[in-house]
Amino acid sequence: MDLVAEVYLVTREFPKEELYGLTNQIRRAAVSIPSNISEGAARNSDKEFVQFLHIALGSAAELETQLLIAKRLKYMNQTDVLIDNLTSVMKMLGGLIRHYKNKSEIGR
């Protein structure tokens, strides 16, 4: 959720004509990450949770692409810190996915 707050702060500075374009897409991708994690955690099985973690990881990859586009368009300067934080989130998601997959393989 910290990443979402950072994204909202950064995208405030985007051109107003991007409000319904790239700004909206970036914000939606960012919000999708913790939303899918929490939805998956509320499910009944580890398998379902892992499925939602994969969706969150996909949203993170989408966000990364959109941030790089915004950087190329010179809409933002501080992409490095934001991308570093996003990379950390992606690593945590990957670790969680591995943990739950290993847990389910051990139980077989």
Image (cartoon, rainbow, N blue to C red):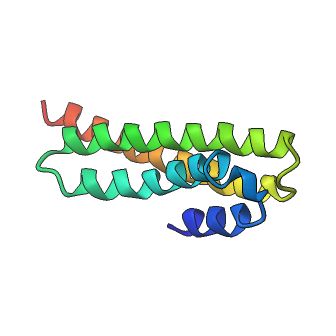
State left or right for residue 63 relative to residue 55: right
- Residue at (71% x, 57% y) in the render: 82
Q: Position of residue 18 (x, y in %)?
A: 71, 50
Residue 38, compared with residue 69, is above or below; it is below
- Residue at (65% x, 52% y) in the render: 23
Q: How many marks?
A: 0
Q: Is 23 in front, or is 107?
A: 23
Q: Is 59 in front, or is 24?
A: 24
Q: Is 63 in front, or is 94?
A: 63
Q: Position of residue 29 (x, y in %)?
A: 52, 48
Q: Quadrant of the C terminus?
A: top left
Q: Residue 66's quadrant in the figure?
A: top right
State left or right for residue 79 relative to residue 89: right
State left or right for residue 10 relative to residue 26: right
Q: Position of residue 77 (x, y in %)?
A: 87, 56
State left or right for residue 80 relative to residue 34: right
Q: Position of residue 56 (x, y in %)?
A: 42, 44
- Residue at (57% x, 37% y) in the render: 61
- Residue at (47% x, 57% y) in the render: 31
For the view shown, which residue lies furthest in the front direction?
Answer: 17
